[in-house]
């Protein structure tokens, strides 16, 4: 064990248990070892938390024994401070990282055989993978995308507690930001309020910024604030996510400054009813697609199905930029027949958008429990009229 570790989010025993599950899957798939290029999976198994995800790094997991870090040399101190994994290899900035990869694999006798690799990893480029294949001709590359991601779906009690804390802080930040809405306040002012509440509450940086948009921008899904001032008779869209030790929770609400049009009230109620329909089915054993069907039916029946352009929700938990979701592992969407299980956590978010007219939604972060579910966020469900 690394004696210098000062800030492990979990016990070494929990990390070793996760590694054992991955190694059992490595053996089941008849792999010699697994190369992990996804920062979230690296963190899940080792504890490594760095902003240096933009540089080439990986975690090598053998069939037996401890994993091995491979990182830029500048990462040495943060490895010492955040990872329990004792085995480390480095590449200096004067050595090309692929040359170093081939060197290290050769030195460790890991340059041949059946090697699992995450072809879905955003941080492993096509160019780099093609170069590895060319430089390691004795390797049979086996796509092992989602091997670790799928194991992350069910959160341990310790993981759930980080998500619970993130949900509470996201709710606190939402309430504080709603209270700060007034005529003339800018999107930047509201962002500052959200960030102040989040960071004063002890969070680490979220994988997405708060999505806070006023005026016409409130109708732009996935827009981010650009400093516009809130005006009378205009809406504000707010979606705020918080990270606690990289475990995220998020919540979405809408506000209106002045006298909202009747349809704004009706659409908020529609999204709330769709959310309630989905929550009713969020319990162990429910196929994920049934939650989506329930949410979608409410919106379809009201004639707004063509404005509901996304899935009903997605797994949420460990994340690094550029996304706070675990959507790649599991979504609440049509065609997803896997059942919900205790320990899974989802962000469920019915929302409808029409450019220049409305952007209305309602969301909660929800933990599946043994007997049903626990909502981890707790902002009042309504259109906030200010």
Image (cartoon, rainbow, N blue to C red):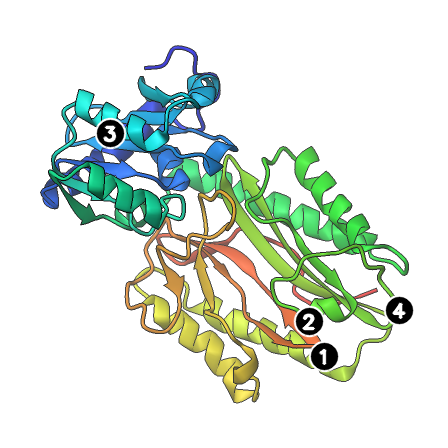
Q: Where residue 303 sits: x, y (%)?
A: 56, 89
Q: Earlier in the sequence, mark 2 or mark 4?
A: 2
Quarter placement of the N terminus? top left
Q: Tag 1's secondary structure?
A: loop
Q: Is 370 left or right of 295, judged from the image as shown? A: left
Q: Are marks 1 and 2 in contact (CB under 8 Å)?
A: yes
Query: Which residue lies under the disc numbered 2?
Result: 219
Q: Quadrant of residue 58?
A: top left
Q: Earlier in the sequence, mark 3 or mark 2?
A: 3
Q: CA distance from mark 3 to mark 2?
A: 49 Å
Q: Earlier in the sequence, mark 3 or mark 1?
A: 3
Q: Nearer the viewer, mark 3 or mark 4?
A: 3
Depth check: give the residue in front, 100 or 259: 100
Query: Which residue lies under the disc numbered 4?
Result: 232
Q: Tag 3's secondary structure?
A: helix
Query: Which residue lies under the disc numbered 3?
Result: 102
Q: CA distance from mark 2 to mark 4?
A: 16 Å
Residue at screen point 62% across, 75% down? 353
Q: Is 27 left or right of 270, judged from the image as shown? A: left
Query: Which residue lies under the disc numbered 1?
Result: 357
Q: Where residue 16 sits: x, y (%)?
A: 27, 28
**Hey, which residue is sitting farthest top in the picture?**
3
């Amino acid at each position: 064990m690394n004696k210098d570790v000062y800030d492990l989010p979990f016990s070494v025993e929990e990390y070793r248990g996760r590694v054992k599950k991955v190694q059992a899957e490595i053996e089941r798939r008849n792999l010699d070892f697994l190369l992990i290029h996804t920062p979230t999976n690296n963190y899940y198994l080792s504890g490594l938390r760095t902003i240096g995800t933009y540089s080439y790094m990986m975690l090598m997991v053998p069939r037996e024994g401890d994993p091995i870090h491979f990182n830029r040399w500048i990462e040495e101190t943060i490895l010492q401070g955040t990872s329990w994994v004792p085995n480390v290899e480095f590449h200096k900035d004067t050595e090309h990282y692929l040359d170093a990869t081939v060197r290290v694999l050769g030195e460790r006798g890991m340059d041949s055989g059946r090697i699992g690799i995450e072809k879905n990893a955003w941080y492993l480029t096509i160019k780099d993978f093609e170069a590895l294949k060319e430089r390691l001709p004795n390797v049979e590359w086996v796509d092992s995308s989602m091997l670790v991601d799928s194991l992350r779906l069910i959160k341990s009690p310790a993981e759930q507690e980080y998500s619970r804390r993130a949900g509470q802080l996201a709710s606190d930040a939402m309430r504080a930001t709603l209270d700060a809405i007034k005529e003339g306040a800018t999107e930047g002012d509201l962002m500052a309020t959200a960030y102040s509440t989040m960071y004063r509450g002890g969070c680490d940086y979220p994988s997405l910024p708060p999505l806070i948009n006023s005026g016409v921008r409130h109708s732009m899904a996935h827009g981010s604030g650009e400093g516009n001032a809130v005006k009378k008779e205009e809406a504000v869209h707010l979606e705020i996510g918080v990270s606690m030790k990289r475990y995220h929770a998020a919540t979405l609400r809408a506000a209106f400054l002045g006298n909202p049009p009747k349809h704004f009230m009706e659409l908020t109620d529609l999204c709330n009813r769709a959310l309630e329909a989905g929550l009713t089915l969020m319990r162990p054993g429910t196929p994920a697609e049934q939650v989506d069907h329930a949410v979608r039916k409410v919106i379809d029946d009201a004639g707004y199905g063509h404005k509901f352009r996304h899935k009903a929700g997605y797994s949420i938990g460990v994340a690094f930029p550029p996304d706070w979701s675990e959507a790649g592992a599991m979504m609440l969407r049509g065609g997803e027949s896997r059942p919900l299980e205790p320990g899974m956590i989802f962000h469920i978010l019915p929302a409808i958008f029409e450019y220049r007219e409305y952007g209305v939604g309602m969301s909660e972060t929800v933990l599946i429990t043994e007997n049903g579910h626990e909502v981890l966020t707790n902002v009042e469900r309504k259109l906030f009229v200010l």
